[in-house]
Amino acid sequence: MEEKILIIDFGSQYTQLIARRIRELNVYCEIHPFNAFPKVDNKIKGIILSGSPYSVNNNDSPNFNFLKFPEIPILGICYGAQLIAKKFNCKISQSNTREYGRAKISIRKKSKILNNIKLDSIVWMSHGDSITDVSSDLEIISSTNDVNVAAYKVKKHKIYGLQFHPEVTHTVHGSKILKNFTFSICGCKGSWTSKKFINTSILEIKNKLKNDKVILGLSGGVDSSVAAFLINSAVGDNLVCVFVDNGLLRKNEYENVLRSYKNLGLNVIGVNAKNKFYSSLKGKIDPEVKRKAIGKTFIDIFEQESKKIKNAKWLAQGTIYPDIIESVSVKGPSATIKSHHNVGGLPKKMNLKIIEPLNTLFKDEVRKIGISLNIPKNILNRHPFPGPGLAIRILGEVTEKRIKILQEADHIFISSLIKENLYNDIWQAGVIFLPIKSVGVMGDERTYENVVVLRAVNSLDGMTADWSKLSSDFLSKVSNEIINKVRGVNRVVFDISSKPPATIEWE
């Protein structure tokens, strides 16, 4: 791996945005919890300390000894800036007025970090504590009307602190500030491109797999497809793609996916395993229990399939970086948002090693790799679809009847988006089946049937998302068609929750 920036996560909701902004500069970066710092080598060009919901004055607040790396440039953001300032004998005090939202900064002294940043530039503040009683070790380079220390430099060190958040779009010149740090201060070259990633990955895959066979769980989605094409470029026929019909796919998806790969040069085997998955889900209601049951069934099937493939020693997965991030907490793995059946390893009895060639990439970066690999647009432009499939879009017990109802409703929604040329404007869409019934009137008769939810969001990588502003006319047409054509549904509602605080999926 080439030059990189390390981001130390103290639990900020914006940590992933810092990584996104650095990646946009074609510089590779990694996020690590403050309590799981990796080994430092000469490829690390800079370290960024994130914000945090904690106060540096709390006894149990997260800490990080950045002074161990005197030669590496360091940038502290919000909590990170306060942590640095405290280490250099400044006082951190609770503000009389919590500063949240837009503010204007004044430039008090020239500095590399704020080079070419105009006076009165808009920045985004989000803090309750402020840096006060500034020691002689710090020089203030920027202030706002309410905060004396909006940005500073530590004298005699390549250490900078920003009280505001340059990673959010509300900070008008935030990307330029991060560029100043990454290029002018850290000396990065910005050479991390799709082409370089592909060439490096192919070489690494060849060296790792040699002549071994590898099986890949193909879902038809972007992540597994790009992983398949990348590995196929490295090992060719030694890759065997297994597409499992778990009975939790969208309507006709199994047949459509197999057909789409027919002439693309991939070795794809279809496995019908609906009944095994239905049996594994019987009586299960808790979403984590459902996820784990599906994951175990997948593993069992791949174990069976691997025995049919001579010299199969690897299982490839389309795991991407948000999967890894959401499965690791700054307080340890016990605080995960949700489990992912493709994160965390395999049972020892399976004797297959894992290869995850995309586990350092965000979703939009995966699509860029796919474009460079000349993967057809109809595959790359598909909306993300959860690994556990419709099982986590059916709240409560998963039954074959509920699956069929959801498949029909989902098919109408997605087909309508495509027909109205809205599909490519939305990052992810789907329908959720609720375990409740409501009273309705259809054909002059009283009904007591199911409720479904339309969900559509816009996002870059799934780490944050906003609900899509679909027109009332469109929603009305979709609702009418679902109620008229899908037996068992008499009410359709629309989800207008953003992430955070909600998640994209309901389970």
Image (cartoon, helix red, strand yellow):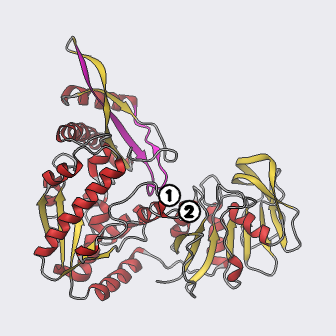
Residue 469 point in image, percent of width and height:
44, 38
* 346 sits to left or right of 253: right
Whether residue 42 is situated above or below residue 489 in the rendered picture: below
Q: CA distance from mark 2 to mark 1?
A: 7 Å
Residue 119 point in image, percent of width and height:
78, 58
Residue 57 point in image, percent of width and height:
76, 60
Splitting the image into 4 quarters, where does residue 131 fall?
bottom right
* Residue type (three-letter) at the residue carrying disc 1: Ala
Whether residue 264 is situated above or below residue 409 in the rendered picture: below
- Visible in this render: residue 156? yes
- Residues marked 2 and 1 touching at CB (< 8 Å): yes
Residue found at x 84% / y 57%: 148
In the rendered image, the residue lying farthest to the top is: 444
Find out whether residue 88 is within the magenta segment: no
Badge 1 marks a residue whose secondary structure is: helix
Residue found at x 65% / y 60%: 51
Q: Over which residues does the magenta segment extend?
A: 446-471
- Visible in this render: residue 120? no
Find out whether residue 458 is within the magenta segment: yes
Which residue is denoted by mark 2 in the rendering? 331
Badge 2 marks a residue whose secondary structure is: loop
Which residue is denoted by mark 1 in the rendering? 335
